[in-house]
């Protein structure tokens, strides 16, 4: 049985981003250029991946809501059209058949 490690962004990742941000600020203040560079790129890459995944989820949710809104509007238009056809005025006329 193979167990594969999957990419997970959870609470630990957010906590590590906060810690690395403070490391970046401290190393920038002390003038440690290499540590500041490494921590900055870590923040850019991991923060960018998290922002990308959150953005994709938001786009999917917004697209789904837009499709739902369009479907509701179409149903309302169809129902209005159906009601107009249903309540047409008819003339009541009597007729006799000649033999």
Image: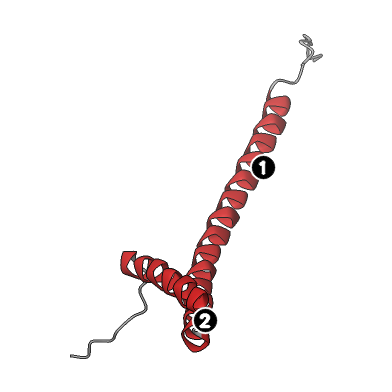
Quadrant for the C terminus, please: top right
Q: Position of residue 37 (x, y in %)?
A: 53, 84
Is 86 or 11 nearer to us in this picture?
11
Is 39 or 98 nearer to us in this picture?
39
Q: Is residue 96 left or right of residue 21?
A: right
Residue at 45% over, 70% down: 21
Within the image, what quadrant is residue 60 found in?
Answer: bottom right
Within the image, what quadrant is residue 58 found in?
Answer: bottom right
Is 15 or 93 nearer to us in this picture?
15
Q: Position of residue 25 (x, y in %)?
A: 48, 71
Does residue 28 sit above or below 70 in this rendering? below
Mark 1, residues whose alpha carbon is within 10 Å: few (<14), some, or many (≥20)? few
- Identify residue for label 1: 74
Which mark, by number, is residue 31? 2
Residue at the farthest front position: 30
Mark 2, residues whose alpha carbon is within 10 Å: few (<14), some, or many (≥20)? few
Q: Going from the N terminus, do you reach mark 2 or mark 1 first? A: 2
What is the tally of numbered marks visible in this picture?
2
Q: Is residue 58 left or right of residue 6?
A: right
Residue at 62% over, 50% down: 66
Q: Nearer the viewer, mark 2 or mark 1?
A: 2
């Amino acid at each position: 049985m193979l167990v594969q490690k999957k990419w997970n962004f959870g609470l630990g990742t957010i906590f590590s981003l906060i810690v690395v941000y403070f490391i970046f600020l401290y190393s920038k203040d002390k003038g440690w250029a290499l540590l500041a560079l490494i921590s900055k790129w870590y923040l850019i890459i991991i923060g960018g991946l998290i922002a990308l995944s959150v953005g994709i989820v938001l786009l999917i949710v917004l697209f789904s809501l837009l499709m739902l809104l369009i479907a509701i509007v179409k149903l309302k238009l169809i129902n209005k059209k159906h009601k107009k056809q249903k309540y047409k005025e008819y003339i009541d006329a009597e007729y006799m058949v000649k033999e």
